Amino acid sequence: MPTLWSCWTVYGPDPVDITMFDLWLARSGNEMLDLTIHAGDDSHLEYTSVSAERAILEKSATTPQEDALVAILRRAIQESIRWKRVSFSFSDRIGQVFQSNYFTTRPSVPNLEAFELDIRETTLSGPPIIHTLGRVLCTSPKIRSAAWKAPVNFEGSDSSYIPFERLTALRFDYLSHQTALEILPRCHTLEYLSIGQFGSLDMGSFSPSGTEMEVDRVTLPCLKTLSINCLDEARTVHHFFKRFLAPSLQDLQLNLGLGETYGSPEAWTALIEFLQESGSTLNTFSFARKLEPLETKRKEAELGRYLKAKPFSRLVESPWLTQSEGWKGELQPYC
């Protein structure tokens, strides 16, 4: 049954896995492919300066595992016309295999619906591999979901190749305030948005009460699920919730609270005004599920007061399985 072989995960391959991959491709017949190819932990460098990473790479020869990974990728590229969903995770040195003319100069991914990229930039010359690969993947007329798990510099890069207008799901490991204002207004059909870290390192002495906040909001008309972690309570929380509206929002996940805290009155005001002005009705709201538990009853009572605001009034608290699971509210079921 070819459909049983249409989904495959390759993680830190050894040379012997090349033959297994060939067998899998043969048995998959003409089925569309759900393909995950990730380097092992030993192949990913820790985040350091680009020059430091380059020095490490130039001194090291390729390993048998890296050679196997490149060989498997080359075989996968030969079948790219059958890709339906792909997830790639490795350094850009490995990713250079995607610069071949065979892959970049023909309609190679006509059936692709979703991709996830985690490609660490380790060289100084040439265009980033993550954009070279992304440009090809986005040529698919069926693409609806995109995810960037490694930090990507969209600023100063040509991101016009990304069809944000027809994407229904987006995930970013990191998204700056400036990039969000550039790309999210184009997301007319977006239903799911996940931002691992939202923020900017160059916002200076931003004040949420300043005149900068008096701007027209951007409406995300179809957004149903928002998962966002803000880097800084005093600035980035306001940057998002004062700039956007989501009238269709049903599920809100703030797993790191409001800027990695349980939130100040100002941060809660920005969040509540965002929900009220959006006019959305939440079905679920997850808050601070990755923070340390509240240390005092006073803090717990303060959090309870915020949760009595109208946008949360239809939610009931779900039982905590552990102390550190934070707060989760769900829509009160009708009897």
Image (tube, rainbow, N blue to C red):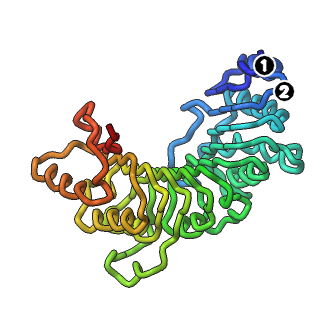
Front in this rendered view, residue 119 or 265: 265
Which quarter shows the C terminus? top left
Q: Residue at x 68, y 56 (%)?
A: 166
Q: Which residue is drawn at 78% across and 44% down?
A: 98
Residue 127 sits in quarter = bottom right
Task: Tell me whether the residue at label 1 lies in contact with that at label 2, contact meaning CB atoms closer than 8 angstroms.
Answer: yes
Q: Which amino acid does label 1 sit on?
A: Pro
Answer above or below: position of 20 versus 123. above
Distance from the alpha carbon under mark 1 to that under mark 2: 8 Å
Marker count (numbered): 2
Could you tell whether 171 is left or right of 245 in the image? right
Sooner in the amino-acid sequence: mark 1 or mark 2: 1
For the residue carrying disc 2, how many other residues have a C-alpha within 10 Å: few (<14), some (14-19), or many (20+)? some
Residue 264: x %, y % from top left: 24, 63
Answer above or below: position of 324 versus 247. above
Residue 160 sits in quarter = bottom right
Answer above or below: position of 248 versus 77. below
Q: What element carries label 2?
A: loop
Residue 36: x %, y % from top left: 66, 32
Q: Mark 1 points at which residue?
A: 2
Q: Is mark 1 on a helix, strand or loop?
A: helix
Q: Name the residue under label 2.
A: 30
Q: Which residue is drawn at 10% across and 47% down?
A: 297
Q: Residue at x 28, y 42 (%)?
A: 326
Could you tell whether 74 is left or right of 332 in the image? right
Q: What residue type is labelled 2?
A: Asn
